[in-house]
């Protein structure tokens, strides 16, 4: 099985300031088809920089990035744009909806751009918005939605083209616990259907759904492993009611 | 558990097994239910301290069962318990002691300790996720308990991250 995503000694040094900032320092990461990988780590540890590079939104300083067995770190910006349309879904820390399009069209557009038929794109839009409890908001403009709603639309949009990989940077950052539950359910569902996911998160509930947690520290992988399931759990292990 | 049993007995007299069932019903599968032996031992102590009293109730083809009820002294203790402010949950700081002290001994390095502890918290969280998905939403007490445990775990993880930033 070839990995969906692979990085080889990936490095990013920001050179725009007075002193160069090494944000990612030699990351070797391999993500298998259907795998859900959570990326955790303290603020400033390079999480956003890493996933931005994986999505072609930031250029690498050195090293390699492979997507579906093709080397992509050497692509031009326009080639990246094409690739993103077809193969990558992206949810940013700060949602990125098109302001003058309805919520529904925001979700439908990526599917159309990726080459889905209008009928399929419409079905996909309806099922995604429905799953996130946003079916009623399809005709609204993004600005009319709350922060949490906009974030859920951004997730629906990222999934619309059934990407090879869903890249997400703290997609539950603005959500209250009820909305987080909807997002978790959708992530769990698409993951079960085989969606590959790489997600930066501080939310331990989200991370514990993943197959694997990669912990970054100072631009390097400090830990990378599966989360054991013990199946003996009760609340008594965390809260002692005495 | 003494006060939990007193509270249940304040509602109505009951025998040991009924108290076990009442605890199970209230907390669902979210909280480990005490075994019947623990309950009888506790009831015995409460009786000795004059907080509950028992009457023997005859049963047809079985040995008598003891039905317990609350005494005035028991009710007073229960009232004091309910009325006084409650200590916040105590942070389990054993890991923190390890984190601070173990490297001095040369036994373990901090990064390894932190990584292992993170995995442990995440696997606890995973269990809680499973527990939550098995808990019927109508079971409000159990749902809230699980949610509380999740929030505590999140705080533990956030603290772990702070330790990593400053100590590792
Ligand atoms: N555009 C940029 N220019 C210069 N430094 C940056 C830029 N973006 C991020 N950094 C720096 O790179 C490091 C990693 O940042 P980031 O990837 O955003 O971390 P995280 O997402 O884990 O908080 C930080 O020290 C940050 O200040
Ligand atoms: Mg970030």
Image (cartoon, coloured by chain):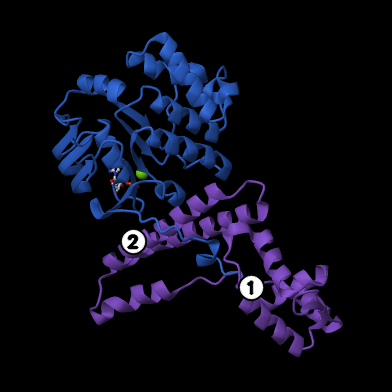
Chain colours: A blue, B purple
Q: Nearer the viewer, mark 2 or mark 1?
A: 1
Which of the two discs, 2 and 1, labels the residue nearer the N terminus? 1
For ligand 1, the image quadrant comes to top left
The residue carrying pointer 1 sits among few (fewer than 14), some (14 to 19) or many (20 or more) residues within 10 Å by Cα, namely few
Residue drawn at the location 47% of the way across and 56% of the way down: B154
Relative to A13, B148 lies left or right: right
Q: Nearer the viewer, residue B105 or B137?
A: B137
Above or below, comparing residue A157 to residue A36 in the picture: above
Image quarter hosting the C terminus of chain B: bottom left
Mark 2, residue position: B165
Residue A18 occupies which quadrant of the picture?
top left
Q: Residue at x 52, y 41 (%)?
A: A180
**Total count of labels:** 2
Q: Is residue A14 left or right of residue B119?
A: left
Which residue occupies the foreground of this view, B72 or A159?
B72
**Residue B126 at x, y = what percent?**
44, 53
Q: Secondary structure at mark 1?
A: loop
Q: Chain of mark 2?
A: B
In three-dimensional space, the C-alpha distance between marks 2 and 1, rounded to whole angstroms, equals 30 Å
The residue at 62%/78% (across/down) is B38
Q: Which residue is mark 1?
A: B87
Rendered location of residue B120, percent (x, y): 38, 62
Query: Residue B118 is drawn in which quadrant?
Result: bottom left
Residue found at the far bottom of this picture: B48
Q: Nearer the viewer, residue B6 or A90?
A: B6
Residue A236 position, x and y percent, is: 54, 66
């Amino acid at each position: 099985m070839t990995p969906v995503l692979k990085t080889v000694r990936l490095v990013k040094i920001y050179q725009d300031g007075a002193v160069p900032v090494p944000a990612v320092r030699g990351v070797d990461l391999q993500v298998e088809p259907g795998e859900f990988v959570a990326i955790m780590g303290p603020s400033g540890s390079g999480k956003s920089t890493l996933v931005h590079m994986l999505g072609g939104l930031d250029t690498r300083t050195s090293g390699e990035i492979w997507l579906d067995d093709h080397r992509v770190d050497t692509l031009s910006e326009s080639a990246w744009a094409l690739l993103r349309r077809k193969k990558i879904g992206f949810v940013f820390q700060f949602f990125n909806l098109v302001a003058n399009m309805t919520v529904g069209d925001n979700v439908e557009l990526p599917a159309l751009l990726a080459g889905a038929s209008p009928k399929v794109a419409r079905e996909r839009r309806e099922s995604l918005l429905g799953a996130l409890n946003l079916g009623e908001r399809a005709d609204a403009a993004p600005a009319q939605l709350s922060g949490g709603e906009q974030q859920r639309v951004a997730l629906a949009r990222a999934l619309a083209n059934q990407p090879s990989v869903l890249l997400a940077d703290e997609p539950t950052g603005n959500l209250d616990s009820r909305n987080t539950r909807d997002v978790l359910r959708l992530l769990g569902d698409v993951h079960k259907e085989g969606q590959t996911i790489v997600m930066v998160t501080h939310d331990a509930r989200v991370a514990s759904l993943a197959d694997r947690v990669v912990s970054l520290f100072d631009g390097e992988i400090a830990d990378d492993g599966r989360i054991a399931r013990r199946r003996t759990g009760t609340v008594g292990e965390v809260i002692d009611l005495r | 558990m003494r006060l939990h049993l007193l509270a249940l007995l304040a509602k109505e007299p009951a025998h040991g097994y009924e108290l076990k069932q009442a605890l199970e019903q209230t907390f669902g599968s979210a909280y480990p239910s005490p075994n019947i032996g623990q309950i009888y031992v506790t009831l015995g102590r409460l009786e000795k301290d004059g907080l509950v009293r028992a009457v023997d109730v005859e049963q047809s083809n079985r040995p008598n069962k003891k039905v317990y009820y609350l005494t005035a002294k028991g009710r007073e203790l229960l009232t004091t318990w309910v009325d006084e402010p409650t200590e916040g949950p105590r942070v389990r700081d054993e890991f923190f002691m390890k984190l601070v002290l173990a490297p001095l001994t040369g036994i373990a390095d901090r990064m390894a300790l932190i990584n292992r502890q993170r995995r442990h918290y995440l696997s606890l969280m995973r269990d809680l996720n499973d527990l939550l998905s098995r808990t019927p939403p109508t079971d409000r007490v159990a749902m809230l308990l699980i949610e509380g445990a999740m929030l505590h775990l999140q705080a533990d993880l956030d603290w772990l991250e702070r330790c990593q930033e400053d100590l590792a």
